[in-house]
Amino acid sequence: MPHIVIDYSAGLETRHDMQALCDALFAAMAADPAIPDPTSLKIRARPHDFFRIGTEPQSFAHAELFLLAGRDDATKAGLTATILGVMDQMLPDVGSLSVDVADMARATYAKRVL
């Protein structure tokens, strides 16, 4: 925990290094004091072949940050700003960049680690 899932329009991976994006996001998040244990970060990106954005064809990348509940809005806003900043730097020609945060309930979140 936390998880970052990046959904993006298929084809971006031919112009952008999506692994480098994941690595840059990891570095930025690991440096943030709101993430006390960087070893718990999980970042992944997945392309979407079929999508529609408004009335004009354009590319997109949307990051969803999943956090265990308990962080205040200011902390969440800081984290989303960090993520959007990295995405803007790494994906400057992408038509639509966005980030959102979802709280995960501590009572129901489960994981298994070796």
Image (cartoon, rainbow, N blue to C red):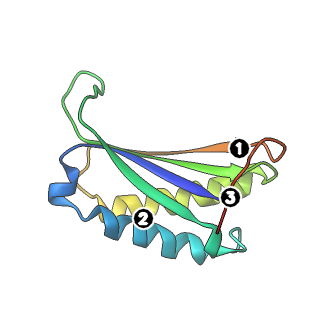
Q: Do the residues labelled 3 and 1 touch (CB within 8 Å)?
A: no
Q: Which of marks 2 and 3 is in front?
A: 3
The residue singled out by tag 2 in the image is 86
Residue drawn at 69 percent across, 54 percent down: 111
Q: Which residue lies furthest to the front in this view?
A: 114
Residue drawn at 44 percent across, 56 percent down: 44
SS type, badge 1: strand
**Among numbered discs 1 and 2, the one appearing first in the sequence:** 2
Residue 5 visible to an observer of this rendering: yes
Q: Which residue lies furthest to the top in this view?
A: 55
Real-space Cα distance between discs 2 and 3? 29 Å
Residue drawn at 58 percent across, 55 percent down: 3
Q: Could you tell whether 28 is left or right of 102 in the image?
A: left
Real-space Cα distance between discs 3 and 1? 19 Å
SS type, badge 3: loop
Task: Tell me the quarter of the picture where residue 101 sits.
Answer: top right
Residue drawn at 30 percent across, 61 percent down: 18
Which amino acid type is marked by label 1? Asp
Residue 68, image x, y percentages: 74, 51
The residue singled out by tag 1 in the image is 103
Q: Could you tell whether 15 is left or right of 70 in the image?
A: left
Q: Could you tell whether 29 is left or right of 51 in the image?
A: right
Q: Could you tell whether 102 is left or right of 45 in the image?
A: right
Q: Which of marks 1 and 2 is in front?
A: 1
Real-space Cα distance between discs 1 and 2? 22 Å
Residue 29, image x, y percentages: 57, 69
Q: How many labels does the image show?
A: 3
Q: Which mark is residue 112?
A: 3
Q: Which of marks 3 and 1 is in front?
A: 3
Work out which quarter of the rendered image holds the C terminus and state it. bottom right
